[in-house]
Image (tube, rainbow, N blue to C red):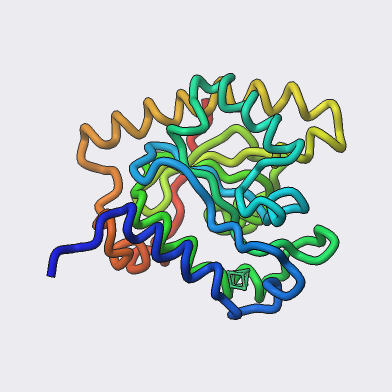
């Protein structure tokens, strides 16, 4: 049997999300929000959880924070249609509360399959919940705008765009981080790829990505 394409895996994950009852977050929501974007994106963004507008539309980052994410992408020289955007949990938590550890765990397999299917060179974490998957024990205020190699990909830690809506001073920090760190991370990833040190995961299987989950993180690369 031919191997499923990246787009087919993403479509399968999206379908599973809409029918998923693995945690209680689906209750009371209108839509699952699996994520959207280029199935072969070089850069993948992982946020926290859908909010009110995302739940209504079934699309990630469509509210105020989504508008700011568009500005941030432009600052990094990216267009929304060229990247893939998702969250660590795919259903909206009640009253926009933080996702619980068991909810993040329940939803982790969907995210792993998306990462394996897209096989991005660079992953950008938005906020502390997605940061924790790749930078265990780190503090966002200390490592925002920095990147490191994790499981064969360059991972960049960023504040969540919504943080700038609550704390105006973070707006410029985010713009500066996106403008500097994402092009630098992409250049670093390109260099690593040329050296044969980047992502060996099979694009659609998900197995290699899962198998390497326990690799120790490498030193933060500061710039
Ligand atoms: S948040 Fe994730 S694990 Fe929970 S019901 Fe939705 S898709 Fe399933």
Residue sitting at x 61%, y 63%: 32
User: Does residue 109 appear to the left or right of 30 in the view shown?
Assistant: left
Residue sitting at x 65%, y 62%: 31
Res 220 seen here? no
Q: Nearer the viewer, residue 39 or 136?
A: 39
Quarter of the rendering containing residue 161: top right
Residue sitting at x 44%, y 64%: 13
**Above or below 42: residue 200:** below
**Above or below 68: residue 115:** below
**At which x and y percent is residue 206?**
33, 64
Q: Nearer the viewer, residue 58 or 72?
A: 58
User: Does residue 9 appear to the left or right of 29 in the view shown?
Assistant: left
**At which x and y percent is residue 201?**
27, 56
Quarter of the rendering containing residue 88: bottom right
- The quadrant of the rendered image in which ligand 1 is seen is bottom right
User: Does residue 205 appear to the left or right of 32 in the view shown?
Assistant: left
| Image quadrant in which the N terminus is located | bottom left
Res 190 seen here? yes
Residue sitting at x 32%, y 58%: 8
**At which x and y percent is residue 106?**
58, 75
Q: Nearer the viewer, residue 22 or 32?
A: 32
């Amino acid at each position: 049997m031919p191997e499923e394409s990246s787009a087919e895996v993403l479509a399968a994950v999206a379908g599973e999300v809409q029918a998923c009852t693995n945690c209680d977050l689906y209750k009371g929501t209108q839509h699952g929000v699996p994520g959207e974007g280029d199935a072969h994106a070089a850069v993948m963004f992982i946020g926290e959880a859908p909010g009110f507008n995302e739940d209504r539309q079934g699309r990630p980052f469509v509210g105020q924070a989504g508008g700011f994410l568009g500005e941030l992408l432009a600052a990094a020289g990216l267009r929304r249609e060229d990247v893939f955007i998702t969250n660590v949990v795919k259903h909206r938590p009640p009253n926009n509360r933080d996702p619980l550890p068991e909810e993040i765990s329940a939803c982790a397999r969907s995210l792993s399959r998306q990462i394996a299917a897209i096989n991005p060179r660079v992953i950008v974490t938005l906020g502390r919940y997605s940061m924790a998957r790749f930078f265990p024990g780190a503090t966002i205020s200390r490592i925002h705008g920095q990147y490191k190699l994790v499981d064969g990909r360059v991972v960049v830690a960023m504040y969540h765009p919504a943080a700038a809506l609550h704390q105006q001073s973070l707006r410029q920090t985010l713009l500066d981080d996106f403008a500097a760190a994402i092009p630098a991370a992409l250049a670093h990833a390109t260099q690593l790829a040329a050296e044969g040190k980047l992502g060996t995961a099979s694009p659609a299987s998900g197995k290699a990505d899962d198998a390497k989950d326990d690799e120790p993180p490498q030193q933060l690369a500061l710039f």
